[in-house]
Amino acid sequence: MRISPAPRRRRSPLPVILLALLVLLIGFAIWLSTRNSEVPTQRIEQDVTNEALAH
């Protein structure tokens, strides 16, 4: 008489998927923090005379 072992239950892939998403999110945050986000300054010239007082 041959007794077969109980079939192994397959593990859920959910923990692996969540771990991969967490690693990707951390990697994306690090990549964003290393990007050069400094905007060069620009000179803005605007007329600030008050037209209401000119009349």
Image: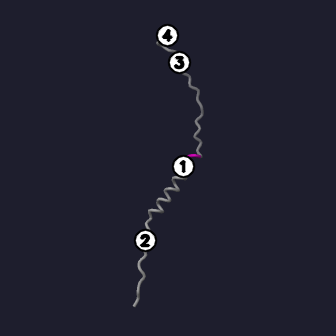
Out of 2 and 37, give the one closest to the viewer. 2
Say which residue label 2 marks: 10
The residue positioned farthest toward the top in the image shown: 55
Question: For mark 2, does the 10 Å Cα neighbourhood hold few (<14), some (14 to 19), or many (20 or more) residues?
Answer: few
Question: What's the residue type where badge 4 is placed?
Answer: Ala
For residue 6, the mark is none
The mark nearer the N terminus, 4 or 3, is 3
Distance from Cα at disc 4 to Cα at disc 3:
12 Å
Which callout, 2 or 3, points at the residue further toward the start of the chain? 2
Structural crowding at the residue carrying mark 4, measured as other residues with C-alpha within 10 Å and reported as few (<14), some (14–19) or many (≥20): few
Q: Which residue is mark 4?
A: 54
Q: Is residue 38 above or below residue 27?
A: above
- Could you say whether the residue bearing mark 1 is in a helix, strand or loop? helix
Which residue is depicted at the point 50% across and 56% down? 22
Mark 4 or mark 1, which is nearer the start of the sequence? Answer: 1
Amino acid at dot 2? Arg
Q: Is residue 43 left or right of residue 10?
A: right
Circles 1 and 2 in contact, beta carbons < 8 Å? no
Among the two numbered marks 2 and 4 on one chain, the one whose residue lies closer to the N terminus: 2
Crowdedness of circle 1 by 10 Å Cα count: few (<14), some, many (20+)?
Answer: few
Query: Which element carries disc 2, helix, strand or loop?
Result: loop
Disc 1 from disc 3: Cα separation: 42 Å
Q: Which mark is residue 29?
A: 1
